[in-house]
Amino acid sequence: MSWQGWFQIAALLVVVVAAVKPLGAYMARVYEGEPVLLERALGWLERLIYRACGVPRDAEKREMTWTAYAVAMLLFNVTGIVVVYGVLRLQALLPLNPDGMAAVGPDLSWNTAVSFVTNTNWQSYGGETTMSYFAQTVALAVQNFVCAASGMAVMVALVRGIARRTTSTLGNFWVDLVRSTLYVLLPLSIVVAVLFVSQGVVQTFSGAHHVALLQATKDATGATVTDQVLAVGPVASQEAIKQLGTNGGGFFNANAAHPFENPTPLSNFLSIFALLVIPAALTYTFGKMVKDTRQGWAVLAAMFVVFLPLLYLAVTQEQGGTPALASLHVDQAASALQAGGNMEGKEVRFGISASGAYATATTAVSCGAVNSMHDSFTPLGGFVPLFLIQLGEVIFGGVGAGMYGMLMFAIVSVFVAGLMVGRTPEYVGKKIEAKEMKMASLTILVPCASILIFTAIAVATEAGRKGPQNPGPHGFSEILYAFSSATGNNGSAFGGISANTPFYNTTLGLAMYFGRFFIKIPVLALAGALAQKKIVPAGAGTLPTHTPLFVAMLVGVILIVGALTFIPALALGPFVEQLLAKA
Amino acid sequence: MLAQLRAAFVSLFALTVITGIAYPLLVTGIAHAAFPSQASGSLIVKDGKPVGSHLVGQPFDDLRYFWGRLSATADANGKPLPYNGAASTGSNLGPTNPALLDEVKGRLDALKAAGPENDAPIPVDLVTSSASGLDPDITPAAAAYQVRRVARARGVDEARVRALVAAHTEGRRLGVLGEPRVNVLELNLALDEL
């Protein structure tokens, strides 16, 4: 690969790391209730919403126990599912439908509603052939904001549980939700959306364009086609929050590979930055809120230790090209005139480097937007996004969700370390006891079980086996990827699978639901338990959790859990395919 | 519980008004004031009529034109219709799928039949499907491969075609971002002006 290819990846990571401290500190101010500059512009709106929602004025009276916090979060999200479902079912009767989209069917509506409320954005549909502008902006993009904010709220509640002592409360869900939306996601989205438009991302409420083809073509029936229909829409506004909120649901079927969604290498750079920056910065927010920023840096370091080698593997595998084409008269070598490599399912403007980096970033983060088709990656190139999802979406992870997932692994890590030396484990001044361990273990085991059991059901049933497009082990990988993506709330796909069937819409919907709420609830329970504890001063027997030793411990636990759980399944998919490809 | 349920509805309604209505309208307003052409699709207008978008590719198989990437898009009935801007998609063919080999071989044969005198290895982007099915670009290598055929079919000097390709080659953004590329539709429009 060219030096520019490596340089742009390095530049991207440098820019992300540079943003961690300022953005992370800013978000800590937002959640600590400290005044931020934007309150001057939007403070009235914030207070208006609180009044309408019945949130008390008095900060003390606002406080919620973990159960109240969980109930509020669940009610809000279930309301979201109902509203999105209703809008999709009724979209034919609603305004802003210039291209005349029909009502969405019940199983697809259920799947899509759960998908957007759980921050997954798995799409069994193609956006430009299914959704009206009303559904895209008022139902789907709204959830892009608020489900991301709801993830951030749960993370903040967990961090408060760690930071506070001998209390039963974790803050107020409505306040955390509204402040995340108004002061973090909305301003960043406006800036990013306008930058996207400057690059050519469309932003319009008019219907599709009809343009003349320079050379007329023929369709499958032999009829002459002289026009090209160009679907457009309010894309930039949705694209910005889709990246920043790590949602990933494309306005168009081809997602960020579509030239109207991601037209230039610069918009692509900005897209990857936008999807990484909040999850990365939340590590600093965590450190700031527990008054020990070293803790946050240690978590960020662990994320990078896993991320970088997998990024390298994905990029180099894709650069290596497709073995099957080696015997043909095809030039796959990189040169000054071409990127070379495996170009099936990739765009020329991105080539290998910007596609490999996007694929790794979007699956490390539980974003799931794609600028290349993961299904057409080489076996080991496609293994990387799959494995990153299976690691639990904690390597950066979704906004909020990645951070609370990572803290669960940190708690398990101190527990394992504690077992080794026979002491009660502590994390950031809190003793980790039986209840905490049960909750942390649940959050790690539930997704593993969901992925493997649903995959097993799919391969054991006729309805499930009808899904894959590709034959052999790659078809199995498509199924495994689908349930990993749904459970991990990622939303990317090995897109060949025909998932718009009642079987897949229902099972994937359940997997998304389990993967979101069966983690959020134990996390809040754990937060409630931690909040009640005293802070134990660090003693001679305390394992410091900001050192390289702990980072290594944490990475070890993540990789061992991920590998032990999934290697047997991965062996049937990408690994055997790699052997076949080379044979 | 009932109070919380009310809060859920009210907050979702309020946030819908803000992020689902005000926000996209604000962005649309700024977009059309600052970047009107980009916001509506970067259309190419010729003699007052839109003849394409700078950003979206079109299908070409005439010898007189440069060809673009393969496109896996289909029409509303699921039948192949390359570069259908109303239904973007990649092929999603896996690396060991025999159908991938068939697709590649089909394009190889077509390119060889179109330019039998050219025995250089064919750049990989010319024999593979793009991710969107709408890729507007090919690599400079893919353009160079086709120069002789296009020049011969048009009866113009190869050097003139080569110069036109060079003029339509876009380098990396800021010198490092993305890959060098040639916009096929723009190049072909320019060819017709020769």
Image: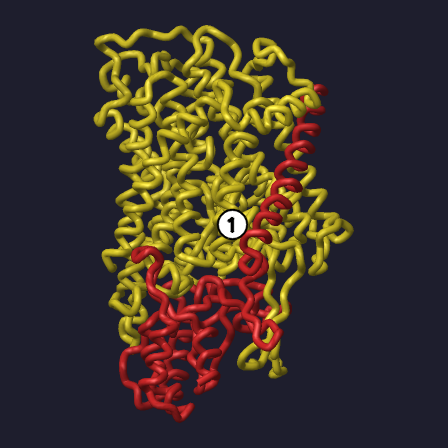
Chain colours: A yellow, B red
Q: Is residue B15 left or right of residue A155?
A: right
- Decide if residue A462 is in sight here: no
Number of numbered discs on residues: 1
Find residue A335 and report its image quarter: bottom left
Residue at far right of view: A93
Residue B128 image point, x, y percent: 40, 70
In the rendered structure, which amino acid carries the disc numbered 1?
Answer: Ala
Residue placed most toward the observer, A2 or A489: A2
Mark 1 lies on a secondary structure that is helix
Vertical relation: A27 (above or below) B35:
above
Quadrant of the snapshot with the N terminus of chain B:
top right
Residue placed most toward the observer, A234 or B62: A234
Seen at 50% across and 24% down, the residue is: A36
- Decide if residue A555 is in sight here: yes
Seen at 69% across and 60% down, the residue is: A99
Residue A306 image point, x, y percent: 29, 39
Find residue B24 and report its image quarter: top right
Residue corresponding to mark 1: A458
Residue B124 image point, x, y percent: 34, 71
Seen at 52% across and 46% down, the residue is: A193
Residue A305 image point, x, y percent: 27, 37
Residue placed most toward the observer, A513 or B158: B158
Residue placed most toward the observer, B114 or A50: A50
- Chain where mark 1 sits: A
Residue at far bottom of view: B155
Residue at far front of view: B33
Vertical relation: B48 (above or below) B118:
above
Q: Is residue A141 left or right of residue A337?
A: right
Seen at 44% across and 14% down, the residue is: A530
**Label 1 environment density (alpha carbons within 10 Å; few <14, some 14–19, many ≥20):** many
Q: Is residue A105 left or right of residue A166?
A: right
Quadrant of the snapshot with the C terminus of chain B:
bottom left
